Amino acid sequence: MLDKAGDAVNWQSVDNAHHLHPFTDHKALHEGRVRVITEGDGVFLKDSDGNRILDGMAGLWCVNAGYSRPELVQAAAAQMTKLPYYNTFFKTTNPPAAALAQRLAKLAPEGINHVFFACSGSEAVDTALRTARVYWQTLGKPEKKFVIGREYGYHGSTTLGASAGGMVDMHRQAGDMPNFVQVMPPYWYGYGGQMSPAEFGIYAAKQVEDKIKELGADNVAAFIGEPLQGSGGVIIPPETYWPEINRICKEHDILLIADEVICGFGRTGKMFGSDYFGIKPDMMTVAKGITSGYIPLSAVLMHDRVANVLINQTGEYYHGFTYSGHPVACAVALKNLDIIEGEGLVERSVVMGEVLRQKFHEVFDDHPLVGDVRGIGLIGGIELSADKRTRRFFEKNGRVGQMCRDFCINNGLIMRAVRDTMVFAPPLIISHEEIDLMVALAKKSFDQTYEKVKHEVAL
Ligand SMILES: *Cc1c(COP(=O)(O)O)cnc(C)c1O
């Protein structure tokens, strides 16, 4: 049965009967039709109906090197043959884990020299948050416990990650851990009003400082933020924002955690989002692009400030995962970094990102449905607006975005809708020809969406 990938009806009914999907309204899914993805090649996916789909999202922002890279398959097979698994507890290590830690330390910003491995972005975030608490506890300040995040921030789906993030539906459904708060995100399009982006960047950073003062710096462990907020709608902070956050965290003695799970490994046109924005993190969480999604792996990259306390003062740190430093995952990550560096994918992200944005500007700047085209490197968002002059949103936020997303997929393009922002993050290997196809498919889908909602759009 496993060979018959083309047997769509069969997989759909098997899936319906037994498979619970992440972030899914199951009733709606069961009433509709699940899509069965059977193959990937380069920037394209194939489904069980035989459709060829351009993956404008690189899976979930992770397939940076593109699908079906034989080098990554071989790296996994070779390591599996030699040593498929051993743990890194009990004073043991393995060559790929040690080599990858060294390589990440070399790539990371100045002062970041130590690496703790986990399996998912959520686990990396959990590890960073626990580490922040352990750090302050070790230094005799156990009351420094609060973690400040941002609205629309996404830090994963474990209880700590969801508590740190600013996704209101996640908070509402399952509740939060104590000692987590969120402040306004640096979302100029939505919240900037009459301020210039530069003024608004300072204003949004000040919300963090006000919150620290309100809680008392003696009670705050860390600030956590994505360099740019991916799942929240590709919210790109004005350039005034992060320098202010650096200053605020330093002045109030708060750890700064950069959640690089999406931004890491070339997405923004730099190796890390922290490099792009000039962030000075005490810890960085990475996942997704570290293996181009081929196998689960994540890590927390720690600045000497934190690592030295853990190493010299904490004693045993009671934390870790069965698969921390998994040799196969680390071997794949090493090969993936060979590809990213060897093929110049970080630089490619700058060049092709510029090309893609330029073409989006050409077709969308005067489009009646589009209020904003934004992006850096190969990540961006196109904001659908009911009135582009006043930046007014549509009634029932998310409805028009979903409509547009459905047109996209029917036309053979994956773009995701976050509220009414259409977001994109294609594999970094995307070619000129594929960019042209992506823009043409997006344009067609946006036009179809406009036809359906034009009576709501101010002209
Ligand atoms: C995806 C994501 C996570 C969670 O990663 P998982 O591997 O899904 O657990 C955390 N932070 C950010 C910024 C993410 O984009």
Image: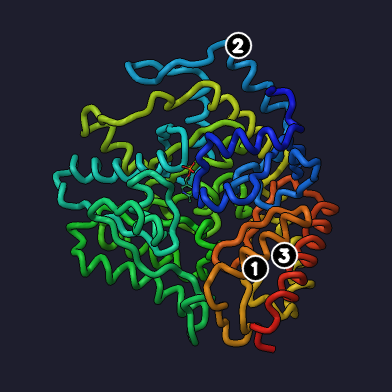
Asked if residue 360 is positioned above or below residue 57 in the image, the reply reads: below
Residue appearing at x 21%, y 33% in the figure: 313
Gap between marks 2 and 3 measured at Cα: 44 Å
- Which mark sits nearer the N-terminus, 1 or 2? 2
Horizontal placement of 119 versus 74: left or right?
Answer: left
Label placed on residue 440: none
Residue appearing at x 33%, y 51% in the figure: 174
186 vs 97, nearest the viewer: 186
Task: Answer whether residue 354 is visible to the viewer in this image.
Answer: no
Quadrant position of residue 359:
bottom right
Asked if residue 60 is positioned above or below residue 100 in the image, the reply reads: below
Q: Secondary structure at mark 1?
A: strand
Residue 274: percent from the left, percent from the top?
A: 50, 53
Between tags 1 and 2, which lies in front?
A: 1
Mark 2 sits on what residue? Answer: 81
Gap between marks 1 and 2 measured at Cα: 45 Å
Residue 31: percent from the left, percent from the top?
A: 59, 51
Mark 3 sits on what residue? Answer: 357
Is the Cβ of the residue at disc 2 closer than 8 Å to that at disc 3? no
Asked if residue 364 is positioned above or below residue 46 in the image, the reply reads: below
Asked if residue 184 is positioned above or below residue 410 in the image, the reply reads: below
Mark 1 sits on what residue? Answer: 382
54 vs 409, nearest the viewer: 409
